[in-house]
Image (cartoon, rainbow, N blue to C red):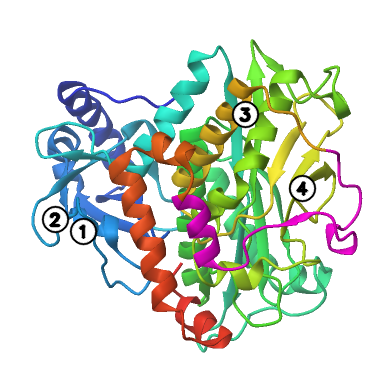
Amino acid sequence: MTTTRSRAERAARARTAAPQLAAEGIDGVVFGWVDNAGLTRVKSVPLAQLEHAAEYGVGAAPCFDFSLVDDSFTRTPSSTGPTGDLRLVPDLDRLTPLAAQPGWAWAPADRYTQGGAPHPGCQRGFTRRAAEAVGRRGMSVRAGIEVEWVAADAAGTPAAHGPGYGMTRFVEHSDYLREVLNALTRQGLAVLQLHPEYAAGQFEVSVAAEGPVEAADTAMLVRHTIRAVSARHGLRVSYAPVFSGGELGNGGHVHLSLWRQGRNLAHGGPGRHGLHPEAEHFLAGVLSELPALLALGAPSAASYLRLVPSRFAGAYRCWGLENREAALRLITGSTAEQANAEVKCFDAAANPYLVIGGVLAAGLAGLDAGLQLPPETRSDPATLGTADRLPTTLSEATDAYEKSALLRKALGRELYEAVLAVRRGEAELFATRTDEDVIEATRWRY
C-alpha cells in the first residue's frame, strides 16, 4: 500500500526518477487531486523542479476544500477563506508518463500543511487511514471503480448512437477505443473490459482491482487518460451523473472484496453465496450506512436524476446476488479471485478517495458490530413495495450524512465539516432550478 515518505526520501526518489523521465522525453509533471465537489484539480512543474516539488511540495490554496461545482466557495467555522496555503506533495510511486499527452507525466498528490504535517482535510490521506485500519485487523481490501463517460462532438452532441452495448458504435469508434485501450495499457493499467454502454455516446472501462488508495489513484488516472485521448480525436468528455434527460447516467460503481492471508472472504465461506462471516459483517455495515454514504458517492444534485428505480442505478437499500437493481450487488464469479461486491448507487461525480474511504469505514463498523445482512432481494425492488428507497435528493442524503457519527469520526472534524458545507452549498445552489437546468449546469464540470 502507498505510504508517506520523509522529505529526504521524496527528494532522493525524485533525483532517481528525473533522468529516467528525461530519457523518455518528459518535460513536465502534473500533480492531481480531487476536491470535495468531485472536481479534479491539477498543478504542474517542469521536470527540473520535480526534486524541489517532491521535497517541499507545491503551493495550493486550502479554499479548494470549500469549492462548489460552479467554482464558487462556501465556508465552515474552520475555513480560512483566501488566506493560508497548503503543499501538494506528489506520490512518486505512482509517477506515470502519460501516453496520450506526450512530454507529460502524472502523479497523484497528498496535501500537507506548510509545516510538513498531513493536512487533516486531505481526502487521499483519509483513504490511507481507512486502509490502515483494515490492515490492523489482519485483513486487506481490493477495490476498483468502473469509469463511465459520454463522448460528444465539439457542439456537445453525443458522438455515438445505436443500441446499448451495440457493435454499431463500437465499429464506428474503433480507432478511438483502441487508442483508449492502448494508452491505459501503456501506462501500466490492467484493463479488464472496454465497451459501449446504454446511453448515447456512452462507454465504460473497468480495470483490475488494487489496494484502496491505489484504486482511487487509478480511477483518477483513467479519467485523465480518457479525456486526453478524446481531445486527440476531437471529442469532449463528460463524467457527469446525467448527460441528457431521460438517458441512463454515468455510474461510478465501486467493486470491493475483503481478504485475509491470501483468501477472498467473499468466496468459499459457510454463509449465503459463499460469504465468510467477516465479509457478511463488512457488507452489512456498508448497506446500513448507504443513506449517509450517498453524500460521498452521489454528491451532486444531478446524482439524484440518475438514481431512479428500474434504471440499473441501485436506488434501493437492499442487496442481492447479481441483482443490478439492488444498491449492493453480490458477484460470486467463477473463481475465488473474481468474487466481490459492487456498490451501484454511486456515480462519476464522486471523489474516489472519499467514496472508497467512506465504504471502508462503514464496512469496518459493520465488522466490529457483527452486523448481519438482511434477507436477500431477488428481483427488482421497485416492484416489491418493501425495500427501503435511498435518499431521492442531495438534501436528504446530506441530512443522513450530518447524522452519521460513524462518518464524522472516520473523516475527522475538518474533512467532515468541509464535505458537509459543500453538500449544503450545492443543495442550496440548485434548490430552485429545473432538472434540465441542473443537467446543463453540471454536464461539463466533471
What amino acid type is highlighted by mark number 2?
Thr
What amino acid type is highlighted by mark number 3?
Gly
Give percent across and percent down for residue 345: 66, 55
Which of pointers 3 and 2 lies earlier in the amino acid sequence? Answer: 2
Task: Judge left or right: residue 254 versus residue 324.
Answer: left
Q: What residue span does the magenta drawing correspond to?
A: 375-402
Q: Looking at the picture, does residue 56 appear above or below residue 61?
A: above
Q: Residues within 10 Å of mark 2 (few under 14, many from 20)?
A: some
Residue in front for this viewpoint, 388 or 348: 388
Task: Judge left or right: residue 152 versus residue 43.
Answer: right
Residue at image coords 55%, 83%: 153
Q: Nearer the viewer, mark 3 or mark 2?
A: 3
Q: Residue furthest front?
A: 403
Q: Quadrant of residue 102?
A: bottom left
Residue 366 image label: 3
Q: Disc 4 designates what residue?
A: 318
The Cα–Cα distance between marks 3 and 1, rounded to whole angstroms, is: 34 Å
The Cα–Cα distance between marks 3 and 2, rounded to whole angstroms, is: 36 Å
Q: Looking at the picture, does residue 257 appear above or below residue 352?
A: above
Which of pointers 4 and 2 lies earlier in the amino acid sequence? Answer: 2
SS category of the residue bearing label 1: helix
Residue at image coords 45%, 45%: 354
